[in-house]
């Protein structure tokens, strides 16, 4: 079984937010659902660029000064 990654979590959270936005009538719940949709879209974009063997983009040597 493959582990759950950030993209999967972002899609599930986005779906929950859209569902709450459509079903619920309370304005506060709709605002919370919009916040959930916003956070899940940021998580999705960050997860797209995640790398397992990535190297930090830090300059070493004489060029660092």
Image (spheres, helix red, strand yellow):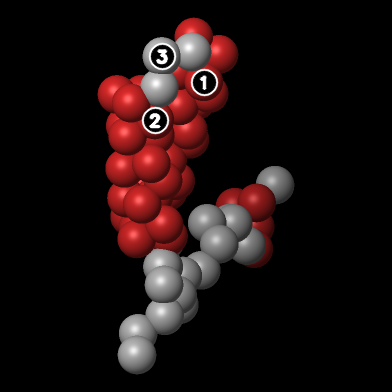
Question: Is residue 39 visible to us here?
Answer: yes
| Numbered label attached to residue 7 | none
C-alpha distance separating marks 2 and 1: 7 Å
Instruction: Kindly identify which numbered label has been placed on residue 25.
Output: 3
54 relative position to 44: left or right: right
Q: Residue at x 59, y 57 (%)?
A: 58
Q: Which residue is mark 1?
A: 29
Decide which of tag 2 and tag 1 comes sooner along the chain: 2
- Tell me: residue 19, above or below residue 43: above
As helix, strand or loop, the secondary structure at mark 2 comes to: helix
Q: Which mark is residue 20?
A: 2
Tag 2 near tag 1, CB within 8 Å: yes
Q: CA distance from mark 3 to mark 1?
A: 8 Å
Residue 31 seen anywhere in this rendered image of the structure:
no
Q: Earlier in the sequence, mark 2 or mark 3?
A: 2
Residue in the image at 36% along x and 52% along y = 12
Q: Nearer the viewer, residue 17 or 9?
A: 17
């Amino acid at each position: 079984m493959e582990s759950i990654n950030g993209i999967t979590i972002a899609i599930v959270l986005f779906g929950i937010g859209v569902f709450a936005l459509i079903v619920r009538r309370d304005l506060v719940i709709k605002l919370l659902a919009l916040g959930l949709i916003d956070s899940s879209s940021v998580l999705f974009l960050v997860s797209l660029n995640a790398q397992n063997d990535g190297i930090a983009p830090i300059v070493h040597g004489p060029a660092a000064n």
